[in-house]
Image (cartoon, rainbow, N blue to C red):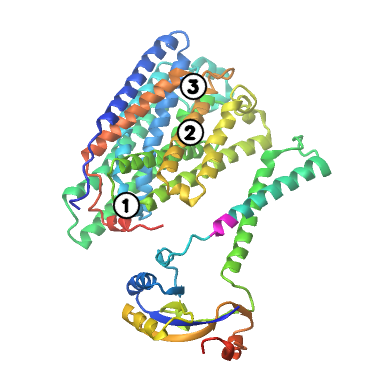
Amino acid sequence: MSSFKEQFEIPGRFRNISFALMAVGIVSVIVGFFMYGSHEPARFWATMLHNSVFFLLITNASMFFICATTLAMGSWQLAFRRVPEAISKCVIPLGIIALIVLLCIVLGDQHHIYHWLDKEHVQHDTILKGKAGFLNPTFFIVWTLLSIGLWIALGHKMRQLSRYLDENPLASVAEGKKYVFKSTIWSALFIVWFALTVASVTPWLWLMSIDAHWYSTMYSWYTFASSFVSGMSLIALFVIFLKNRGYLEVVTEEHLHDLGKFMFAFSIFWCYLWFSQYMLIWYANIPEETIYFKPRVQGAYRAIFFLNLIVNFFTPLLLLMRRSAKRNYTSVAILAVIIIFGHWVDFYQMVFVGPFKEHVDLNLFDFGVAAGFVGLIMFSTGRALAQAPLLAKNDPFFKESVIHHT
Amino acid sequence: MSVKKFVVGCFDDEAVLFPAVKKVRKAGYKLHDIYTPFPMHGLDHAMGLRDTSLHTAGFIYAITGTTTALGGISWVFTKDWPLNIGGKPHFALPAWIPITFELTVLFSAVGMVLTFCYLCQLAPFLKKHHFHPRATDDQFVMVIECNEKTNEDEVKSFLAQAGAKEINVQNAETGWWLGRYDKDTMPFQVRKEKTAFE
């Protein structure tokens, strides 16, 4: 093992780019705050909400990926397991930023974004009054704190279990079984909490309550699919980056093929949920449900709505279908960027249509803030990668991953 | 169809089989096929087989299904017999997507099963020569094709060195013929005397 490059060193250019992007982000936030902060605060906070929640959820998808594969006794991911581990470490800074943004919106009474914050309005609104037990600041804040806090804590525990093996190799089969059992228990805990948060309650609070009168039972699954497919793309991007720099020698086309399959399959899964939500509402044609799609399909957001479908479904479907496309580093990298951008746009139309129904105002401010988050993810992941050996070589399933063959 | 001569070697260990395949290809003998009791990862690669084109066929069947469904439904509901269903437009695309999806899957599934059977030459009452009955049980059966110039004793000793446990020479029909396994007729045995190298 000594011949492998196990220690990642952050390249100077990578560090410079991440700092430049973060600087762009900070400047954008400051400029945006002075441009919109006083007379149109909803515009500022909607951008912050969109970006912080999107990037938080796609980095958190990495830990979900680790836990799901651990529970399934998967082994193929171990060759690059340190990459999703490092990405999941971004949940700490991004979670804190998202927490601050959400607290500012709720405590700052931004009822242009969350209608249900307006107490007087809720008094005359039968629907919002009925939902008040769920949509109220106390529950929102408690649940948000719990969500982000437990993602960080359980994720930390998972990373710790994996890191522990680096210094303490498993001495016997019995010890290996004990390790597998322990990581199974902790990943099961994470998965249960993930199901209660990302796959159900958290998107209802953070995103669906922007359209407070409307609801959809598909919504959280839809959000989850969106964030998971972008999360897999993010993992693929970092794996390809490390391969290009000459690291991760044991990762081969076979592993890339499986990552590509995830990107391909979950793009289809995303579209399945998108369509299930859309078609039932279209078919039933009940005004209180169609209100959600009216500005999206027939209003100002028409172009974004269809762009969303083309970029997030047809592009990966047609371009990633071939086996050779999933095994090619260039095509997977390009599609990963396209998918992440597409789902960023998807989240944009989830957040922005509620407060701004009349016109689309996607400008440099949004892209600047997004660039800042990209820089933060690059910086944080790069640092986390440099802190730990790149190969989880003492894991009991590691050999299986090295000889992995699809 | 033609009758050819084959040297058949049986292996009982896949750890021996894989290096043997490599040696046979390196020596330049023509591998007819390898019959294994279960699918073996990487064997196709080791034998140098090209990728199957079954998935391309599947894609073509799938888009045939898609166009059949969309073309059929839109013709029926907009031209041939427009009906007002729940006040929806006649061209009600979202409502057709599930049926389009089903037909896509149906066409590709049925088409691929039939294509698979065709590629493997599998059909009722269709017979192919079995080189060794234990290829379906516990033996990996490697079959090497001979031509007029092949020295079969050389091939036999080569296979023995590569680790084959049981080696024999068979004259066999390469293609398929109609017949039943319980009422066995072997057309190639009747024609055997006509072959060039016996």
Image quarter of the C terminus of chain A:
bottom left
Label 1 vs label 2, nearer the camera = 2
Check disc 1 and give the amino acid type: Thr
Q: Decide: marks 3, 2 in contact (CB < 8 A)?
A: no
Q: Which residue is mark 2?
A: A343
Please state the horizontal and vertical placement of residue A186, each as a whole percent of the image. Answer: 30, 47
Majority SS type along the magenta span: helix
SS class of the residue under badge 2? helix
Sequence order check: which comes first, mark 3 or mark 2?
A: 3
Q: Earlier in the sequence, mark 1 or mark 3?
A: 3
In this figure, which residue is indicated by the disc labeled 3?
A114
Residue, x 57% and y 91% (percent of image)?
Answer: B193
Q: Pointer 3 indicates a residue of which chain?
A: A
Residue A161 relative to residue B80: left or right:
left
Residue B116 in the image: above or below residue B184: above
Spatial CA distance of label 3 from label 2 is 22 Å
**Which three-letter amino acid code belongs to the residue tagged 2?**
His
Which chain's residue wears label 1?
A
Q: Which residue is mark 1?
A: A184
Nearest the viewer among A331 and A26 is A331
Most foreground residue, B141 or A109: B141
Is residue B81 visible to the viewer in this orientation of the structure? Answer: no
Amino acid type at image mark 3: Tyr
Mark 1 residue crowding within 10 angstroms, few (<14) / some (14–19) / many (20+): many
Residue A99, position in %: x, y? 36, 26
Highlighted magenta segment, given as a residue range:
B53-57
For label 3, the crowd category at 10 Å Cα-Cα, with few meaning under 14, some 14 to 19 and many 20 or more, is many
Label 1, label 3: how far apart the Cα atoms are: 38 Å
Image coordinates of residue B145 in percent, x first then y, are: 47, 78
Residue at (32, 20) in percent of width and height:
A23
Query: Residue A231: x percent and y percent?
Result: 41, 39
- Residue drawn at x 32%, y 41% as measured from the top left: A244
